Image: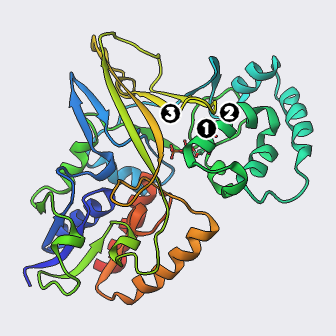
């Protein structure tokens, strides 16, 4: 056979695997159905600004091994994500911290904030069983109503009572004046952009673009010993057990003839009326001083077959179906399923790298 590995998808999972396999003398072919490498971390470069074409990507991790790993491919800047929530023109700091509480209630001490939240969370007496109950028991009803409910229901197209609690646990709640959106030890944006990382990972590796694995190859292809598949798991099996649900996104990007549009990289719109969840002003990820700026409005969408799938919807119904697909996947002895779509998992970038490195270890070492 011509290759040891055929890697379907050139996002982080596929690229990390390909890079490590090549280092160990394996021959790899990476295919991607898009016309560029990098999956969803791909950026477009215009007027000196990296535009996060598939949504904002901010690298953060607490895993030193992963941090050292990505730093081989690029140096990272000192960007700290401190998004701002805009609720019908009222501005609040995120994540939920003393700055948020102080603005919301005109208070100044952690004790005052705790007293208010403790009182409001009495509304939930049981173990939280959905996102609404989880949110109220973490931050009380005011914050839930102004900063969570509208945003979350737009984002997921479902009621907060029908969403899994774990989604809201992604966000820190702090009784300190600290607007860092992440708790992780390491954080930043790669200097020179994400594309550089993927380009370096795939250096010297055969890559074919505009090539959809599910169309270009059949299951008993004779080109590679093994397949690393990072596309949607249900698509691989031709949806034979039914469709998994995903959340889609639509991006509307504008170039504006002004230096600074909103003064922050990420502004979340937490009301329920506006159809978009956030506006990204890309230059602020890299402290850009260009005379122009690019902004992107992010509209969550119902996902339809053939569209880009961004978020898995990990509710009970979909999880049950995923488990059945996973059983089929486990029977495919020469295929490894990985990444957000291959594992139907709400993975962050660092976790994708971690999981690719784990596969590398069990597969190659
Ligand atoms: N969230 C919210 N209000 C905000 C930001 C986030 O209620 O202003 C909730 C929402 O349910 C969202 C979840 O927190 O789905 C996770 O947000 P995160 O920023 O981690 O989402 P991502 O950046 O992955 O889209």
Mark 2–mark 1 CB contact (< 8 Å): yes
How crowded pointer 3 is (Cα within 10 Å; few <14, some 14-19, many 20+) is rated as: many
Q: Give the number of the mark in front: 2 or 3.
A: 3
Q: Does residue 175 appear anywhere in the picture?
A: no
Q: Quadrant of ligand 1?
A: top right
For the residues labelled 2 and 3, the Cα–Cα distance comes to 14 Å
Label 1 vs 3, first from the N-terminus: 1
- Which numbered marker is on residue 276? 3
Q: Residue under label 1, please give it.
A: 151
Question: Mark 3 near ligand 1 (CB under 8 Å)?
Answer: no
- Indicate left or right for 121 with 38 as reference: right
Q: Position of residue 174 (x, y in %)?
A: 71, 36
Compared across the picture, whether 335 is left or right of 63 comes to left
Quarter of the image holding residue 4? bottom left
Q: Residue at x 21, y 54 (%)?
A: 34
User: How far across and how far down the image is residue 289, in percent?
Assistant: 31, 14
Total residue callouts: 3
- Say which residue appears at 79% left-offset and 44% top-offset: 136
Where residue 188 sits: x, y (%)? 41, 37
C-alpha separation, residue under disc 2 versus residue under disc 1: 7 Å
Secondary structure state at the residue bearing disc 2: helix
- Residue at mark 2: 147
Task: Decide if ligand 1 comes within 8 Å of the CB at mark 2.
Answer: yes
Asked which secondary structure carries label 1, the reply is helix
In the rendered view, tell whether residue 196 sits above or below residue 216: above
Label 1 C-beta lies within 8 Å of the nearest ligand 1 atom = yes
First in sequence: mark 2 vs mark 3: 2
């Amino acid at each position: 056979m011509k290759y040891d590995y055929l890697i379907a998808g050139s996002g982080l999972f596929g690229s990390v695997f390909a890079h490590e396999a090549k280092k160990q003398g394996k021959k790899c072919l990476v295919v991607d159905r898009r016309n560029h490498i990098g999956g969803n971390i791909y950026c477009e470069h215009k007027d000196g600004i990296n535009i996060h074409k598939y949504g904002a990507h901010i690298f953060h991790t607490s895993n030193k091994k992963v941090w050292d790993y990505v730093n081989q491919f690029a140096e990272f800047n000192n960007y700290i994500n401190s998004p701002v929530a805009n609720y019908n023109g009222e501005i609040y700091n995120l994540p939920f911290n003393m700055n948020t509480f102080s603005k919301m209630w005109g208070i100044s001490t952690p004790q005052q904030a705790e007293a208010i939240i403790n009182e409001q969370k009495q509304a939930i007496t049981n173990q939280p069983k959905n996102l609404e109950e989880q949110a109220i028991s973490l931050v009380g009803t005011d914050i839930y109503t102004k900063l969570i409910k509208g945003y979350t229901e737009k984002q997921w197209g479902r009621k907060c009572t029908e969403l899994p609690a774990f989604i809201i646990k992604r966000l820190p709640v702090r009784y300190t004046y600290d607007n860092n959106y992440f708790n992780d030890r390491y954080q930043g944006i790669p200097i020179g952009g994400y594309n550089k990382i993927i380009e370096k990972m795939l250096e010297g590796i055969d890559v074919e673009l505009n090539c959809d694995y599910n169309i270009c190859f059949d299951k008993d292809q004779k080109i590679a010993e093994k397949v690393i598949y990072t596309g949607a798991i249900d698509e691989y099996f031709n949806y034979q057990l039914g469709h998994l649900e995903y959340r889609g996104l639509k991006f509307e990007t504008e170039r504006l003839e002004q230096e600074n549009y909103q003064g922050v990289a990420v502004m979340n719109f937490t009301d329920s009326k506006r159809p978009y969840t956030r506006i990204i002003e890309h230059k602020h990820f890299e402290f850009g001083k260009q005379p122009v700026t690019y902004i992107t409005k992010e509209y969550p969408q119902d996902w339809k077959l053939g569209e880009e799938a961004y978020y898995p919807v990990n509710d009970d119904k979909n999880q049950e179906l995923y488990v059945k697909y996973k059983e089929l996947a486990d029977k495919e002895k020469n295929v490894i399923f990985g990444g957000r779509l291959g594992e139907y998992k709400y993975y962050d970038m660092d976790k994708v790298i971690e999981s690719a490195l784990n596969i590398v270890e069990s597969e190659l070492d």
